[in-house]
Amino acid sequence: MTYNSRTLPLAGLVFALPVAAATEIERFNPEGLSQPDGYSQVVIAKNPGRFIYLGGKAGIYPDDSFPESLAEQSRLTWANIDRALKAAGATREDVVEIQIYIVDLENVDPNPVYQDVRDFFPAGHKPASMVIGVSALAYPGLLVEINVRAVTD
């Protein structure tokens, strides 16, 4: 534990306050993914370990176009997740949590998305996950979006 030179006088006692090591945060948009202005495609927080946050990955091509069907969007979403993980120096095994948002979940068959989740992760690797039905996503016509959190050494 690191201590700084600041102390806290309290009832005649002096305590040294621990200071956590500074966390370095790196944010970027990897080549091969769209290059948004308002958010980062990948965020890496270092110390201790590396916490990697993939913000809202979707089945969007680098030119910001996307396929029409849920199945095609799901396949492209997972390809984009894989690309972003590799750009951050992580693998599928490093993923600790996913949050899946599906438009109109009550009225669509989500099985293509569920199958892609099972196909994406290696045997025995099951990150924490949740599926959330939503009325819409950022782009009209976008049907699935996935947040991913990973941790590496």
Image: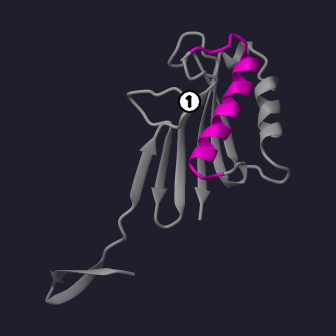
Q: Is residue 28 above or below residue 66?
A: below
Q: Which residue is drawn at 53% across and 55% down?
A: 51
Q: Kindly report the secondary structure that dominates the magenta region of the rendered protein.
A: helix
The x and y percentages for residue 3 are 30, 81
The x and y percentages for residue 131 are 67, 32
Quadrant of the rendered image containing residue 94? bottom right
Quadrant of the rendered image containing residue 70? top right
**Would you name the residue on which mark 1 appears?**
33
Residue range (magenta): 65-90
**SS for dot 1:** loop
Q: Which residue is drawn at 60% across and 21% down?
A: 61
Describe residue 121's horizontal placement relative to residue 7 as left or right: right
What is the count of numbered marks? 1
Q: Which residue lies furthest to the right in this view?
A: 123
Looking at the picture, tell me which residue is in the foreground, 91 or 151: 91
Residue 71 is inside the magenta segment = yes
Describe residue 27's horizontal placement relative to residue 34 as left or right: left
Instruction: Tell me the kind of residue under disc 1.
Output: Leu
Q: In this view, does 6 lie above or below 88?
A: below
- Looking at the rendered image, the quarter that the N terminus falls into is bottom left
Looking at the picture, tell me which residue is in the foreground, 83 or 114: 83
- Looking at the rendered image, the quarter that the C terminus falls into is bottom right
Q: Residue at x 59, y 57 (%)?
A: 151
Q: How crowded is mark 1: few (under 14 residues within 10 Å), some or many (20 or more)?
A: some
Residue 133 is inside the magenta segment = no
Looking at the picture, tell me which residue is in the foreground, 46 or 98: 46
